[in-house]
Image (cartoon, rainbow, N blue to C red):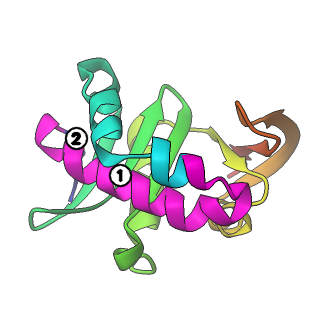
Amino acid sequence: MIRKATQRDLSRIAEILVFVKRIKFRPIFQDDDYSFGELQVLDVVKRYDNPELLSCIYVYDDSGIVKGFIHVDSTEIVTLYVDDFFQGQGIGSKLIRFALEGTGATFLWALEKNEGAIRFYERHGFRVTGERKLEEGTTEYLVKMERTE
């Protein structure tokens, strides 16, 4: 079931975000100070413990286990993370469909070197627009993807 996130979900959301970022982004950024120093579950919980932010986050809850989440702000998919243990089970696809049908999301920014994510979004009707911007504080680029279907 996909539902609006609550404060009770914060630690699980933070855990998923931290570990997926370490697994998927560390090979790209190769920044151990960030991955294992700055990027900590408790810090993410504090950052997300904001009613306005939390109101834009939806979790995939499977019998009380949060397996993934999506953050949608207006028409932008800001983030989508699925716990690595549960990837390949269609959870990300369900979250994307929810965002498209339930919130009217139409675009997102993906890390240019995250080819797996770009392929995933392309399978769901998003296309790279050619627009790029630097990921803040890094030398890596984000690419804009828009829904074409």
Determine which quarter of the picture holds residue 25: bottom right
Q: Residues within 10 Å of mark 2 (few under 14, many from 20)?
A: many
Q: Can I make out residue 124 in this image?
A: no
Q: Secondary structure at mark 1?
A: strand
Q: Residues within 10 Å of mark 1 (few under 14, many from 20)?
A: many
Looking at the image, the residue that sits furthest to the right is 130
Q: Quadrant of residue 138?
A: top right
Nearer to us in this view, 125 or 137: 137
| Left/right of residue 141 with respect to residue 30 in the rendered view | right
Quick check: 9 above or below 21?
Answer: above
Residue at 23% x, 53% y is 12
Q: In front: 148, or 22?
A: 22
Q: Position of residue 71 (x, y in %)?
A: 42, 39
Q: Of the residues shown, which amino acid type is indicated by label 1?
A: Phe
Instruction: Find disc 1 in the rendering and name its residue.
Output: 69
- Is 103 in the magenta? no
Image location of residue 100, percent across then percent down: 49, 46
Q: Say whether disc 2 or disc 1 marks the residue closer to the N-terminus.
A: 2
Q: Main secondary structure of the magenta part?
A: helix
The kind of residue on which mark 2 rests is Ala
Disc sitting over residue 5 in the figure: 2
Q: Are marks 2 and 1 in contact (CB under 8 Å)?
A: yes
